[in-house]
Image (cartoon, helix red, strand yellow):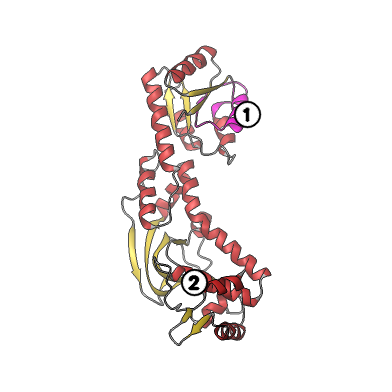
Amino acid sequence: MSYRILVIEDNPDMLENIASILELGHYEVLTSENGKRGIEIALKEKPDLILCDVMMPELDGYGVLHILGRNPSTSTIPFVFLTAMSDFSHIREGMMLGADDYLTKPFDDSELLSVIEMRIKKHEQIKSAFDRDIHSIEEFLSRAREVRGSRGISDQLQSRVIKKKNFIFMEGHEPLDLYYINSGLVKTYMMTEDGKELVTGIHGAGEFIGYLPLLENSSYNESAIVLEDTVVYMISKNDFNSLVYSNRMIATQFIKLLADNLFEVESRLLEMAYQSVRQRVASSLMKLFTKESDENGDCPLIRISRKDLSGIVGTATESLNRTLADFRDEHILELTEAGIKVLDKQKLMGVAH
């Protein structure tokens, strides 16, 4: 695979020399003699890495990095500063803006190629897609530690077993950790002004909870209580901030791991707005069915109280009970004192849609 490198340098001789070295290293080279033109090329061509001089007329390297860093299509491209300055304060300023590395002029051929090879390699490692199981998350954290600026991430995730009916966190408390559910079932809810419980979600294995207060630096606006014995892994607040704020590519991949929760919340709100009670009950049971299913797709009893299920559906308990009775009579599910057993998954799915 041939990688494309964009070089932004206002010195023609330096620009030509760098381009020649990179071409000898079997890279495809794009060049620009100023920052404004460099931004145009980056937005159009989406190079694999950008080498950019710091001191340039009209728009300097800091300005180039700032503009490209705010554009989603270019924000994760590795960015390396070229600088003739040895003053550490200028280098530090660039790194704080989000640069991945820097080269101080004059540099030799091997140094240039080594930095580019290392940055592209680390970029490729961290941008790989990660599943949302604990082994993949640990692999992601391991790779993140290797990237410059993220070495402060803890070496090992801490885990806890939380028994049924115990809280993971409570509304109004300050967040100290991000929680990943490895197994079990967790209900999140908030209390309304009139003292009623509003269920905001039922969460199972493979889900993160409690990240919005960490992003917003605010207190929890909901509580999380365990519905069945649950194993959670914690990412500390300090590690969370390192993952989100230290490196653009790490932040992008980390947010992708969290993003499914946002889509699930949005989907649930749309369901509550446009679906019938019957559809919402079926949809909620299908989600719980999926969370409870084992590796073979077999589902044990769905053990959830009618109160909690009505909160998820967004309807009165009486309406929920009538709908469940209808599903029982249609042989879609079986109701027992121990829980709900789905008898006809396909039929339930058909009602949900």
- State the residue at coordinates (33%, 69%): 161
What residue range appears in magenta? 34-61
Q: Is residue 285 magenta?
A: no
> Does residue 192 appear anywhere in the picture?
no
Helix, strand or loop at mark 2: helix
Q: Dividing the picture into quarters, in which one does residue 103 lie?
A: top left
108 relative to 237, above or below = above
The amino acid pointed to by label 2 is Leu
- State the residue at coordinates (60%, 62%): 266
Q: Pointers 1 and 2 in contact (CB under 8 A)?
A: no
**Which residue is more in the foreground, 103 or 325?**
325
* Extreme residue toward the right, this view: 274
Helix, strand or loop at mark 1: helix
Residue 55 in the image, given as x and y percentages of width and height: 53, 22
Quadrant of image for the C terminus: bottom right
Which residue does the numbered mark 2 point to in the structure image? 288
- State the residue at coordinates (66%, 71%): 275
The reply, left or right, for residue 169 in relation to residue 42 is left
Mark 1 vs mark 2: in front: 2
56 relative to 302, above or below = above
**Which residue is more in the foreground, 221 or 235?**
235
Quadrant of image for the N terminus: top left
Instruction: For marks 1 and 2, give the CA distance.
Output: 48 Å
- State the residue at coordinates (64%, 77%): 277
The amino acid pointed to by label 1 is Glu
Which residue does the numbered mark 1 point to in the structure image? 40
Residue 144 in the image, given as x and y percentages of width and height: 39, 44
